Image: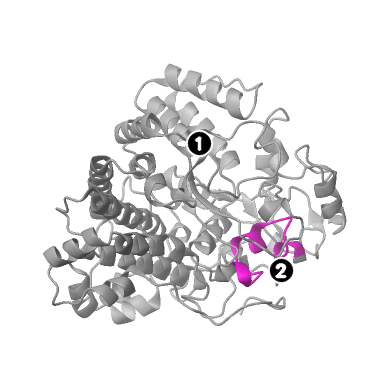
Amino acid sequence: MKLNKILVVAGVSAMVGLSSCNELDKEVFTNAVTSEQKEQALEMNPELAQASINAISTGAYQMFAVLGESHDDFGLPAVMMMLDSNGQDFVSPNSGYNWFSPSVALTVGSNRSDETYLIWFTCYNAIKSCNSALASIPADAEEPILQFYRGQALCFRAFYYWILAQVYQHNYSGHESAPCVPIITEENEEEAATQGAARATVQEVFDFMTSTLNEAIDLIAGSGITAQEVMSTKPKRFFNLDAAYGMLARVCLTMHDYEGALEAAQNCLSHTGCQPYSLAEVSQPTFISLDDSSWLFGLPVAPSDEAVLSWIVNFPSMMGSFCYGYAQNGAWRWCNANLFNAIPDSDVRKGWWLNSEYESANLNDAYMSYLDSFGYTDDRDNGGIAVQKYTQVKFAPYGGELNTTTNACDIPYFRIEEVYYILFEAQAMTGDVTGAVSALNNFVKTYRNPSYNFVGASSQAVQDEIWMQRRMEFWGEGFVAWFDLKRLGKPIDRRGAGYPSPFIYYVEPGSDVFVLPIPQQETQTNKLLTNADNNPEWNRPTVVKD
């Protein structure tokens, strides 16, 4: 395996899978039960529906569900780290403690790579759970609570297809007829299991996502129910109406459907109570609580979760600079030096990473003393446990406790700031450049940089500036950096970024490197998807001069 040294795992119990929607469905309903009977049972006991939707949410953080006892297998948060590692801004070492080094090294172009297996089966396992919930809740359900939960399953399913579609094919625009991924629903799931399922086109997959989200929006809006009414603890594990509109805005932006993105983003903002993080809130390590006003939806994590009890097989262990785990044993995460140096000193985000003097204005004495204990180095190839330049200090430890082993930080999937940036980009790309520039200036001045003053005379200039803002804002949050490179036709350019020498690449837009091959197991078992139908495998890119 990748790891040369393994930290001692304390307190890990035997793997116990969370109840999935599928298991709940089988447990409560047999095939002999009609849809009408299922609906009546759910109306009498809506907690069954809630449990199945909650299982979709919390099931995203299962350990060892795909790859066996591999420490890069902790569900969707691990997928997020893989996607960021593929790109150019999320720098990490060539170290035995870096479980994501194959993604950084871009040695994942095989149909047997851990990356393609984890992404494919994590997403399709979740889709299976969504389909099971949808099979149990009729599309014409009249009870508002059932409409709400059906809307949840539809949103989650669209979310996972949005990930799959961008991993297993090039960008939507210009590739509408290219083969993408199979569309599996509650209606064709049984047939697909026995007869196989062919790859749908990119156009078909995105049309499916938009129709699914529009149905979900109608259901959630029609129900009149909010997540806060049905879930008292961390309710934003579910989609409120604002998050559903936000997800539609994401999909439309990916399609370059700027009019659709603009409308969906406006609808999101008109229905939301979320507020961007303030300057004060992000002037210190944070981004760990689903209860923060900025978050539209995300992954709730509890101290009792198995990934947390493992101490180290979790997102904070791999990412965090202030908690116990792999990062502090030499697998620190750093910012691209070029990106860091492009951030104005007046921007609060400059303090989300250490500077070249190993300092951050966002850290108090306790945080700095903690980092001091590891020492510092600028040797990217042989740094050991010492802290590197541009190391991230964005994410706080759980409870603010330095060196904590309770890595129970929530995981952000989607923040309201992203919707604003979608809105500004779509506004510019649909012709209102002046309005977009004004809105962008007001937003950044208010929330990130009081001295900000962008002057852009074209839609392309605004789009490029927003790409830079998104690179800064959503660093390390999994669903922006890699997908933006593909969406905007950008290269992977690691020159001068501070990567270890074996990981310095320049990859042209449109390269096969931007598309993963479908896992071998899928092509061996899916009767309508042979290896001849697969994406091409690819070799590690050629190392270039820094």
Is 385 magenta? The answer is no
* Identity, as a three-letter code, of the amino acid under mark 2: Ser
Look at mark 1 in the image and give the residue it sits on.
417
Residue 466: assigned label: none
Determine the secondary structure under disc 1.
helix
* Between discs 1 and 2, the one toward the N terminus: 2
Q: Is residue 133 visible?
A: yes
Is 325 magenta? The answer is yes
- Which of discs 1 and 2 lies nearer the camera? The answer is 1
**Relative depth, front residue between 220 and 86:** 220
* Identity, as a three-letter code, of the amino acid under mark 1: Glu
Q: Which residues are magenta?
A: 308-328
Residue 420, how many percent across, how many down?
46, 32
The quadrant in which the N terminus is found is bottom right
Crowd rating for badge 1 (residues with CA inside 10 Å; few <14, some 14–19, many 20+): many
- Up-down relation of residue 265 to residue 251 (above or below): above
Image side of residue 236 versus residue 332, left or right: left
**Relative depth, front residue between 175 and 340:** 340
Residue 180, how many percent across, how many down?
30, 60
For residue 138, which quarter of the picture? bottom left
Look at mark 2 in the image and give the residue it sits on.
95
Mark 1 and mark 2: span between their CA atoms?
Answer: 34 Å
For residue 226, which quarter of the picture? top left
Residue 69, how many percent across, how many down?
56, 80
- Up-down relation of residue 425 to residue 86 (above or below): above
Residue at 29% across, 70% down? 533
Q: How is the image coloured?
A: one colour
- Up-down relation of residue 443 to residue 538 (above or below): above
Image side of residue 28 versus residue 520, left or right: left
Residue at 75% across, 62% down? 328
Residue at 42% across, 52% down? 231
